[in-house]
């Protein structure tokens, strides 16, 4: 079993994500490394986590990218750690897109009422809007290994870190 817990910004922990393996033992610890071999609860095999994103408009919505390039989602981040968070795989057609099977980073944000999930990898940046299929994103962005993605809501700008290509910005993401 695995438990992920986020805090709502109040109290002594502020905004932070915590994890605990084997819900019967041990305390929750702050997530400080994405190298911990943990799994999205009981609905997925135990795989190493590459990256985690938390929906900035609802901290209970957690997105996990595992080492096989699969994208997982749970809207039960506020539930007790011992409960099943009912993880849903969002990978869909991502692995059939050129470079979409070798993703490294994940970011999530809201655009109006729509959920936007972005992953970066060997093929550049890929985008999932609500239940639509995955598609390549970022006109003019080279297909280089993207190791980091950050969305800055106040400026409506996506920052992309492709390996060896500097930093790219995509306005009105």
Image (cartoon, rainbow, N blue to C red):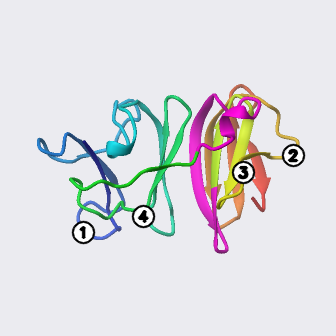
**Gap in angstroms between the C-alphas marked 3 and 4:** 24 Å
User: Is 20 placed above or below 38 here?
Assistant: below
Residue to which mark 4 is pinned: 59
Of callouts 1 and 2, which one flags the residue occurring earlier in the amino acid sequence? 1
Q: Which quadrant, please, contains the N terminus?
A: top left
Residue 59 forms part of the magenta stretch:
no
> Is disc 1 in contact with disc 2, using a CB cutoff of under 8 Å?
no
| Left or right relative to 19: residue 146 | right
Please tell me whether mark 4 sits on a helix, a strand or a loop: loop
> Is disc 3 in contact with disc 1, using a CB cutoff of under 8 Å?
no
Please tell me whether mark 2 sits on a helix, a strand or a loop: loop
Camera-nearest label, 3 or 2: 3
Name the disc covering residue 11, or none.
Answer: 1
> Can you give x and y, in whole percent of width and height, for residue 106 in the image?
57, 44
Q: Which quadrant, please, contains the C terminus?
A: bottom right
**Gap in angstroms between the C-alphas marked 1 and 4:** 15 Å
Of callouts 1 and 4, which one flags the residue occurring earlier in the amino acid sequence? 1
**Gap in angstroms between the C-alphas marked 3 and 1:** 39 Å
Camera-nearest label, 1 or 2: 2
Residue 114 forms part of the magenta stretch:
yes
Q: Residues within 10 Å of mark 1 (few under 14, many from 20)?
A: few
Of callouts 4 and 2, which one flags the residue occurring earlier in the amino acid sequence? 4
Residue to which mark 2 is pinned: 139
Q: Nearer the viewer, residue 161 or 4?
A: 4
Q: Residue at x 38, y 44 (%)?
A: 43
> Can you give x and y, in whole percent of width and height, for residue 25 in the image?
11, 41
| Highlighted range, magenta | 91-116
Residue to which mark 3 is pinned: 133
> Can you give x and y, in whole percent of width and height, for residue 114 in the image?
65, 68
């Amino acid at each position: 079993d695995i438990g992920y817990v986020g805090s709502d910004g109040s109290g002594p922990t502020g905004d932070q994500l915590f994890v605990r393996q084997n819900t019967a033992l041990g305390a929750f610890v702050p997530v400080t490394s994405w190298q911990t071999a943990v799994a999205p609860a009981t609905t997925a095999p135990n795989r190493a986590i590459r990256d985690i994103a938390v929906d900035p408009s609802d901290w209970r919505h957690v997105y996990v990218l595992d080492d096989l390039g699969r994208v997982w989602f749970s809207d039960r981040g506020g539930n007790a750690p011992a409960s099943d968070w009912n993880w849903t795989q969002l990978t869909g057609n991502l692995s059939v897109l050129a470079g979409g099977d070798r993703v490294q980073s994940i970011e999530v944000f809201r655009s109006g009422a729509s959920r936007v999930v972005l992953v970066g990898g060997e093929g550049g940046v890929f985008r999932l809007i609500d239940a639509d299929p995955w598609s390549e994103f970022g006109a003019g962005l080279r297909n280089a290994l993207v190791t980091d993605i950050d969305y800055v809501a106040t400026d409506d700008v996506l920052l992309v870190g492709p390996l060896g290509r500097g930093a790219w910005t995509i306005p009105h993401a």
